[in-house]
Amino acid sequence: MKTMLLKNKILPLMTAIIVGILFTLPLGLGDLTNIVATLITILASFVGFRKAAFKSLGLSNFKDQRCDFFIYAPLLAIALFGFYAFVLLPVVTYLTGLPIDFSVFKKFEGDLPACAVMLLFIWVSAAFGEEIIWKGFLMRHFVRIFGDGTLVIVINIALFGALFGYVHAYQGITGQIVAAVIGMVLGFIFYKRKYNLWFNIAVHGFFDTIAVICMYYGFL
């Protein structure tokens, strides 16, 4: 009983608090914040689930999912990016009256080596890291604690989508709202795909890959 309490409630709560501190306090980690938070959540998963740690995050049977990872996920990422660029971003910009702040990405325009490094970094930090933190660990534990009723799932998707938006504060209020909506869409995909994290990682990674290409050509 004590072991189950530790694994399913105390450990995830402590991990969530630590991750929250990493993302809210000025600890000077910069771009490494995601990676540090990812390593902490993976470590917590190993403490709680031992050999089944990766499975508990939704990372299992990659060989059976290669078609989804390399074909269906990229197609969905293209569609999602189209929605983001041509529908979501213009609508939110109109409602807030403020453009999204992409100034941090201007240095990548026309710089192929920098974009190549950035591409590698976002697959590690954003695609793998953010999906492990927000979906594989936090969303999964939310279900383990509160169940998988319809209302719980809605709150789960909305809550962690909103928090995902919050950590994109460097993009301004418009960027935060847009990121929150995209986070909720990714959360819904995670739920509909029966908590298959590989698919989410692929969609997120290819979405950001398109974004890096846009950065290089100055479209962002």
Image (tube, grey):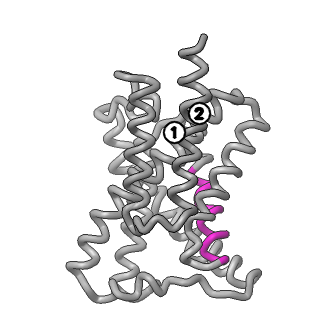
Residue that carries the numbered disc 1 in the rendered image: 137
Q: Residue at x 65, y 62 (%)?
A: 181
Q: Is residue 192 visible?
A: no
Residue that carries the numbered disc 2 in the rendered image: 141
**Residue 22 placement (x, y as % from top left):** 50, 57
Amino acid type shown at disc 2: His
Q: Main secondary structure of the magenta part?
A: helix
Name, please, the residue furthest toward the left: 113
Q: Residue at x 69, y 50 (%)?
A: 159
Instruction: Give the structural element (helix, strand or loop) at label 2.
Output: helix
- Mark 2 in CB contact with mark 1 (< 8 angstroms): yes
Quarter location, residue 183:
bottom right
**Residue 15 placement (x, y as % from top left):** 53, 41
Relative to 207, 64 lies left or right: left
**Residue 39 placement (x, y as % from top left):** 37, 45
Relative to 53, 134 lies left or right: right
Name, please, the residue furthest toward the top: 1
Q: Residue at x 42, y 27 (%)?
A: 47
Q: Which residues are magenta?
A: 173-186
Quadrant placement of the N terminus: top right
Instruction: Give the structural element (helix, strand or loop) at label 1.
Output: helix
